[in-house]
Image (tube, grey):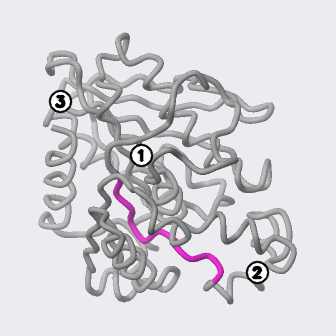
Amino acid sequence: MPEILRPQIVDFAAYGVTVKEAVPFGTGGSETLLMDCFYLEGSPAPRPAIIWIHGGGFTEEWVTRLSRPEKSFLALVERGYFIASIDYRLAQVDPFPAQIHDAKCAVRYLKAHAEALGIDPDRIAVWGESCGGQLAGLMAVRGGIEGFEGEGGWNEFDSDIAAAVSWYGGFNIAKFTAMQQDPRFITMYGGTFAEKRDLVIKASPITYADKPLCPFLAMCSNTDNRVPDSQSQEFCDAARAAGNDADFLMVPGQGHGYFEGDAYYDKIYAFFDKHLK
């Protein structure tokens, strides 16, 4: 079983970490959207904030905001970060772009409540895995993308972020030809590829690689059987060619799931420290 399906478990109370569970942050259609928040009461405010966006192909009901790298959450909280792990509508409830609407709503919520939460609204980043990494790629576009903001709440605030990390994100959905034959694709995008071609292109971060982006770090394994590492590489190459700060880190032999090895996590922590501190 890939590590992604075995969420890490940390006893945060043992480390003095405050955890606020099931905090409502907006609405998605008829659903109340929830996040879990993690921070140290004594850490200096205003803190930089990181939003974790889970994967699951927009459809897997067992992958939720509780599916998260809690060891990394602890390490980041101890470095002075505020962490929010969010849920979003699954595609069987509402197809894309509902998921990007909800993720952007989480950013706006943090900005709207920055003073009460003790965070800096100008130092908010996202970290997503799999389809959450796809969302991170879309959220990295400075100034946003037309039609992707949504009406979930706090729309007087923008959803620009300061940095983004993607683990094995899908950056060019049109190239997933095998997935397009899967009935789940119709659930994800509300129709066949032929019917939703324009939406699929709009949902692909590669479409915006030549636009101004926030600093970006993409990681993927060369043995990932779901998302080829070429997707991350091509996105970062195109983004750098356009003058953006975008780095790709290939993780050899680790497939599709939480990576093993402190060095890979140290890269993430250093990336956030560089762009949020």
Could you tell me residue 59's position as x and y percent?
A: 69, 60
Q: Earlier in the sequence, mark 1 or mark 3?
A: 3
Cβ atoms under marks 3 and 2 closer than 8 Å: no
Q: Is residue 49 left or right of residue 192?
A: left
Q: Is residue 255 placed above or below 50 in the rendered structure?
A: below
Check residue 182 in the rendering and tell me which mark sits there, or answer none. Answer: 2
Q: Amino acid at mark 3?
A: Tyr
Q: Helix or strand or loop: what does disc 2 sit on? A: loop
Q: Is residue 191 left or right of residue 165?
A: right
Q: Nearer the viewer, mark 1 or mark 3?
A: 1
Q: Magenta span covers which residues?
A: 164-174
Q: Amino acid at mark 2?
A: Asp
Q: Helix or strand or loop: what does disc 3 sit on? A: helix
Quickly name the residue at label 1: 52
Residue that appears at 45% across and 80% down:
231
Q: Earlier in the sequence, mark 1 or mark 2?
A: 1
Local packing at callout 3 (Cα closer than 10 Å; few below 14, some 14-19, many 20+) is: few
Local packing at callout 2 (Cα closer than 10 Å; few below 14, some 14-19, many 20+) is: few
Q: Amino acid at mark 1?
A: Trp
Residue that appears at 42% across and 75% down:
235
Residue that appears at 34% across and 81% down:
221
Residue that appears at 81% across and 76% down:
183
Quickly name the residue at label 3: 15
**Quarter of the image where one finds residue 203:** bottom right
Cβ atoms under marks 1 and 2 closer than 8 Å: no
Could you tell me residue 186's position as x and y percent?
A: 82, 70
Q: Is residue 258 placed above or below 39 in the rendered structure?
A: below
Image quadrant in which the C terminus is located: top left
